[in-house]
Amino acid sequence: MTTATLTKDKATSPPPPAAHAENARRARRRGRIIAVLFAFPALLLLGALVVYPVLFSIGRSFFDASGTRFVGGDNYAEMFRDPATLKAIRNTVIWIVVAPTLLTGLGLILAVLVEKVRWATAFKLLLFMPMAVSFLAAGITFRLAYDQDPDKGVLNAAAVSVHDAFTGTSSYPTARARTGPQGLLTQGRDGSYTTNTAVSPGASVALPMVGVLPKDLPGGASSAYPAAGRKAAPGELRGVVYLDFTPGGAGTQGKVDRQESGLPGMKVQALRDGRSVASTTTASDGSFHFSGLSAGSYTLKLPKSNFAPPYQGISWLGPTLVTPAIIGAYLWIWTGFAMVLIGAGLSSLPRDALEAARMDGANEWQVFRRITVPLLAPVLTVVFVTLVINVMKVFDLVYIIAPGPVQEDATVLATQMWLVSFGGGNNQGLGSALGVLLLLLVIPAMVLNVRRFRRSQR
């Protein structure tokens, strides 16, 4: 074997194990360096926009409002002494319990039902469209929808329509009896009117009212003058309820003039010994009569229902309903999100298990409860936890929808943190403490979600 052959064999022989391990370490080191270089811009932004603000807020929470005096844990103690903060914590708990539960349930029901709809894609698109609307726009929309004025708020317009259809409404909410020497009526504590003196069958009475604009009179109202001139028959009690007002200021108070209109649709009762013995409603000219009354003295009464103010609907944004109303707006936005995620999990379920259950005699409800829901449990958990995290950060809807007077009744931790820090409180120390509390509440849900994702990947 020549020297050249030996040299060639050395050159082609594999490197020793130590050299191979060293090369592998160098390759891994280069890979890590390259990965860090690629990730460095993202890490820099994460540190500047997340890590630094979190650390700064934690440090700031130990100082007073001005940020110059160290107060230790006083801000954290103040959180649980402040009634507004306690109310924010209570409302946040309500949001966490109610909103994710309803959204997950609605998303599950809709995802199952959509599978049986012919135009499933279009239906999903319609339900998912609110996700494309900003919280600002959604808040303004629902603020108008919840408006107390039925002429503006669509929900109260519907509520008033239904109420008036079943209960009816008074025609003369602003009417009141004529006072002074010409007045024949006295107002009771409940808002009704009764005659000052007793009347008997065979008499005719005129009951003057004011406070009704001529333009507000019912369309069928006619002149009360002819009715006032009619005489009562024996055993009959007759009268007229009229608007004691003549356009132009002419006419005599307490007397039915030719141009004065009757008040049709007014309920009139005849009372004897404080009990109603007869009831009627005025005609188009305001006239009424009672027949068949026994001899004796009676008092005429105009019930309070004649003068009841019109039904104005439900106070959606009042102190009692403001939080449920805002949660309703949140459901409108996020139901499509829950439906799409659960629908994706539903589409991956093994169909043979569902068909086998049906072949064994299970009905659709049993298949849904015993097969579909247990198999979807991991997806439902992810959706629920994701919504919990999102709910704890809700700010826009609460701040926009809740009016100023009830802002404190609707406040949650995110809005309270802003109000304390920048919305007039000017106490960044307490606001930072609220931010730290919110962070501590979000972290367990985030950890649970991360573990769930890792478990699903394995």
Image (cartoon, grey):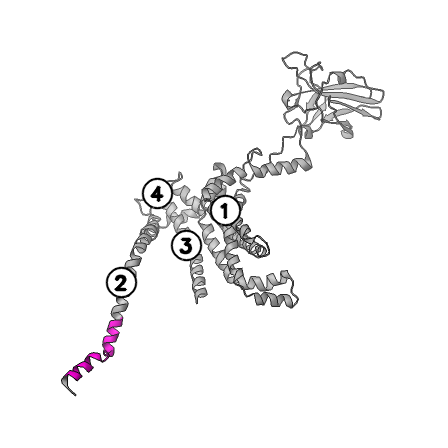
Front in this rendered view, residue 169 or 235: 169
Q: At x 41% / y 54%, what residue is drawn?
A: 440
The answer to whether the residues at label 1 and label 3 have Cβ atoms under 8 Å apart is no
Q: Which residue has dot 3 on it?
A: 440
Farthest residue toward the left? Answer: 3
Asked if residue 333 is positioned above or below residue 25 in the image, the reply reads above
First in sequence: mark 3 or mark 2? Answer: 2
Residue at disc 3, secondary structure: helix
Residue 9 part of the magenta-drawn span: yes
Q: In the image, which disc is placed on residue 130?
A: 1
Q: Is residue 9 left or right of residue 387?
A: left
Front in this rendered view, residue 267 or 362: 362
Packing grade of label 1 (10 A; few <14, some 14-19, many >=20) is: some
Q: At x 23% / y 79%, what residue is drawn?
A: 16
Residue at disc 2, secondary structure: helix
Q: Position of residue 76 (x, y in %)?
A: 39, 49
Packing grade of label 2 (10 A; few <14, some 14-19, many >=20) is: few
First in sequence: mark 2 or mark 1? Answer: 2
First in sequence: mark 4 or mark 1? Answer: 4
Q: CA distance from mark 2 to mark 1?
A: 44 Å
Secondary structure mostly seen in magenta is helix
Q: At x 55% / y 66%, what residue is drawn?
A: 350
Residue 213 visible: no
Q: Which residue has dot 2 on it?
A: 33
Amino acid under disc 3: Leu
Q: Is residue 430 left or right of residue 92?
A: left
